[in-house]
Amino acid sequence: VEPLPGPMAHTATFCFGDLNYRLSLSNLEVRWRVASADWRQLLFSDQLVQQLSGEPGSAFEGFTEAEVHFRPTYKFDIGTNTYDASEKQRTPAWTDRVLWAGDARSLLYDACLNTITSDHKPVKALFEI
């Protein structure tokens, strides 16, 4: 029996889910920038963006993420579109991500902001291969 090829040996490889990366800013600054829809400044402090921008040996070396044009997808009060108002006041972040490597072109990358059954907002992506 011939061994299966590794993930990067395929035309395209996808990795998606709750990758749990956070923003390295204070909760107050993150919430202020979210209220201002200042995604660009927030993404400068995003741990995954920093890894994808050339950190050799990172977990996702060789992978790409489409441009993010939606608010952070974590941490909401369940049943609402309000960021964590509990005693813990967790900092909003883009923990839910879609990454790819190989020959694929991103056509859509967005959050499902109307979903209120979780403390996360799911993300969706569409690709042409």
Image (cartoon, rainbow, N blue to C red):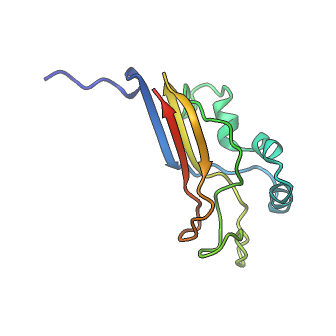
Q: Using residue 9 as the reference point, say whether residue 55 is left or right of it.
A: right
Question: Could you say which is closer to the camera, residue 96 or residue 6?
Answer: 96
Q: Quarter-wise, where is residue 69 in the image?
A: top right
Q: Could you say where residue 73 lies in the image, as x and y percent from the top left?
A: 64, 57
Q: Residue at x 73, y 75 (%)?
A: 85
Q: Residue at x 68, y 29 (%)?
A: 53
Q: Residue at x 13, y 23 (%)?
A: 1
**Farthest-out residue, bottom:** 87
Q: Report the label total.
A: 0
Q: Could you say where residue 74 lies in the image, as x and y percent from the top left?
A: 64, 60
Q: Could you say where residue 97 lies in the image, as x and y percent from the top left?
A: 57, 46
Q: Quarter-wise, where is residue 129 in the image?
A: top left
Q: Could you say where residue 78 lies in the image, as x and y percent from the top left?
A: 59, 74
Question: Could you say which is closer to the camera, residue 54 or residue 94?
Answer: 94
Q: Residue at x 60, y 42 (%)?
A: 109
Q: Is residue 82 above or below residue 105?
A: below
Q: Using residue 67 as the reference point, say whether residue 120 is left or right of it.
A: left
Q: Is residue 117 above or below residue 110?
A: below
Q: Using residue 104 as the reference point, say whether residue 22 is left or right of it.
A: right
Q: Is residue 85 above or below residue 51?
A: below
Q: Is residue 91 above or below residue 41?
A: below
**Farthest-out residue, left:** 1
